[in-house]
Amino acid sequence: MTLPRSSCTARAVLKGAGRFFAIACYLAGIAGIIHYSVAAHNVASESSLIELSQLLLLVLTVFTFRRVAKRNHALSQAAKLMSGFFLVLMIRELDATLDLVMHGFWKVPALLVTGLTIWPALKNGRDTFTSLAHALSAKSSTLLIVALGLLLVYSRLFGMGELWEQAMGAMYVRDVKNIAEESTELVAYSLIWLSALSYWLEAEKQRHPHPPSVMHTVEQDVPAQ
């Protein structure tokens, strides 16, 4: 009676291959955005496809974490903090647009969102700390941490003007530095949204656990030969 076990193994392999194919297509699309922006000679402006894609990914991330907060009580406080944090990043990305109101005006809505996010978290300190512990112990946390490191540390160091001036010497072109920095940020934002999706899917699984499959039941009931 090894057929059920073999069937489950094959299904798991096919599922993994399907996930790889889906993520590969997703990242190929991200690369396509970068290629298009470079071909259009429009990388760092607010109207560039890269910048617009970054904003879209941030909007999706904020919305997804808000859904996680509503669907999973254990992750609620942590997901609200994450949603607020990425909303502040989105406001920061809109600094050039908000500067039309007043120079540095982006800080006003950013500080407002920060206050509205942190105050409830501090007010429910114990619940927030417990929720953060749940969030950091989840499978999705590794991808989120790596993506944040890529966004907040690696992209800043990789996009330093001094690095590209040394690398290119007299042939230094600022657009090359911008392409490197903005494309790295775009990849980071794409991974952040993937982690948010992973949190949401896990929350949905916990709300609607699947009953044991027939194959699994057969494996348990039939003794090994």
Image: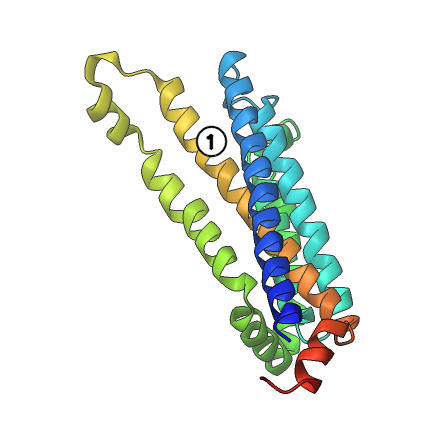
Residue at screen point 64% across, 49% down: 87
Q: Is residue 61 left or right of residue 176?
A: right
Badge 1 amino acid: Glu
Nearer the observer, 93 or 12: 12
Residue 112: image location, x then y, percent: 66, 53
Residue at screen point 51% across, 25% down: 34
Camera sees residue 41? no
Q: Is residue 51 left or right of residue 175?
A: right
Q: Is residue 64 left or right of residue 82?
A: right
Q: Quadrant of residue 85?
A: bottom right
Nearer the observer, 65 or 33: 33
Which image quarter holds the C terminus? bottom right
Q: Quadrant of residue 99?
A: top right
Residue 123: image location, x then y, percent: 65, 76
Residue at screen point 68% across, 57% down: 65
Residue 185: image location, x then y, percent: 48, 38
Image height check: is 62 above or below 46?
Answer: below
Camera sees residue 58? yes
Nearer the observer, 213 or 71: 213
Image height check: is 118 above or below 20?
Answer: below
Classify mark 1: helix, strand or loop. Answer: helix
Residue 182: image location, x then y, percent: 47, 31
Q: Quadrant of residue 214?
A: bottom right
Q: Which residue is mark 1?
A: 182
Residue at screen point 65% across, 46% down: 109
Q: Count neighbours of disc 1 (C-alpha within 10 A) and say few if under 14, some if 14 to 19, many if 20 or more.
A: many
Q: Is residue 78 left or right of residue 209?
A: left
